[in-house]
Amino acid sequence: GEMFRALIQNDQAMTVVVAIVMINTALYITQQLVYFFLKYDFSPSTYQGDFTLFNMVGGGCQILAMMILFPVLRRFMDTIKIFYTCFGMAVTGYIIIISATGTSSVGWLFIPAAFIMSAVGVLNVIITVFLANTVDYGEFKNSRRDESVIFSMQTFVVKLASGIAGFISSMVLFVFHISSNKEAVVTEPIAASSRMGLRLSMTIIPIAVLVIGFIVFKKRYILTDRKLAEISTELEKKHQN
C-alpha cells in the first residue's frame, strides 16, 4: 500500500515507472521471440549457435554501453536528450531486422543487436538517474522522501514487464501457429505468412510499445536540469529552516 501511495502521489515517479515498463516490455518481447525467429525464419539450420552468438553480442553491447557509451554521451547531451537518442537507436535496430531479407548470416543481425542492446543498456542507467530525481521531486511536492519505496518499484515493474511480454509472445506464437516447444525439431518450414507475422510481431510490437513510452515520457516528465536545480535550492532552504 505504501508503495502505491508513494507512486500515485508522485506523478514524475509514475511517469518513469511507465517508461521502465515500456522499455523492458519491448526488450523482453524481442528476447522471447528472437529464438523462434532464428529457428523458423532467419537461419533454421544453424539457429542454436546463432542464438548464442546473438545473445553474446547483444549482452556485450549492453554492458559496454552502460560503462562507456553513457559517459561519452553525457559529455555532449543532458540525460533527457540521451534518453530520446536511445529510443531512436532501438527503433533503428528493429527497422534493420525487418529489412534483413535475403540473408541467413547471423553477422547481419549483430548490427541491430548492437543498436537495440546498447540503447537498452544506456536507458537502464538513465532510468536509475530519473528515479533518483523523482525522490527529490517527491520530497519537494509531498514533504517526504520515499527513496526505498520508489527504488523498490523498479524490481516490481521489471517483473511486470516480463509478464506482459510473456503473454504477448505466447499470443504471437498461438496466432501464427508456431510451436512454443524450443526443443521441437524443425521437420518442415512454417508458412510464409507465419514467418512474416513472427518477424513483424518481433519488431513492430516493440516499436509500438517504445513509441507509447516515448510519448508518455515526453508529455509528462518535467524534471529537466533547470527544474532539478530549482528543486534542490528549495530543498536546501527547507532543510536550513
Image (cartoon, rainbow, N blue to C red):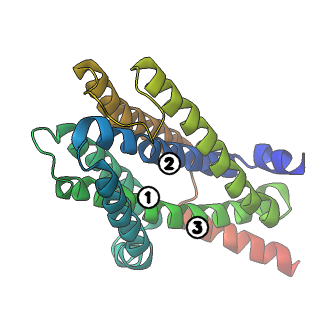
Front residue of 5 and 62: 62
Front residue of 151 and 34: 34
Question: With respect to residue 31, does 174 lie above or below?
Answer: above
At numbered mark 3, what does the secondary structure look like: helix, strand or loop? helix
**Mark 3 highlights which residue?**
129
As measured in the structure, the alpha-carbon distance from the residue carrying label 2 to the one carrying label 3 is 15 Å
Instruction: Identify the residue shown where x is 68% and y is 72%.
Output: 232
Pair 2/3: label in front? 2
The part of the image, by quadrant, that contains residue 196 is: top left
Q: Which mark is first along the chain, 3 or 1?
A: 1
Q: Say left or right for 15 vs 190.
A: right
Kindly identify which numbered label has been placed on residue 120. 1
Say if mark 1 contacts mark 2, CB within 8 Å. Answer: yes
Percent position of residue 85, x then y: 34, 57
Instruction: Identify the residue shown where x is 26% and y is 20%.
Output: 191
Q: Say left or right for 122 vs 100.
A: right
Front residue of 92 and 59: 59
Three-letter amino acid code of the residue under disc 1: Val
At numbered mark 1, what does the secondary structure look like: helix, strand or loop? helix
**Mark 2 highlights which residue?**
23
As measured in the structure, the alpha-carbon distance from the residue carrying label 1 to the one carrying label 3 is 14 Å
Question: With respect to residue 94, does 72 lie above or below?
Answer: below
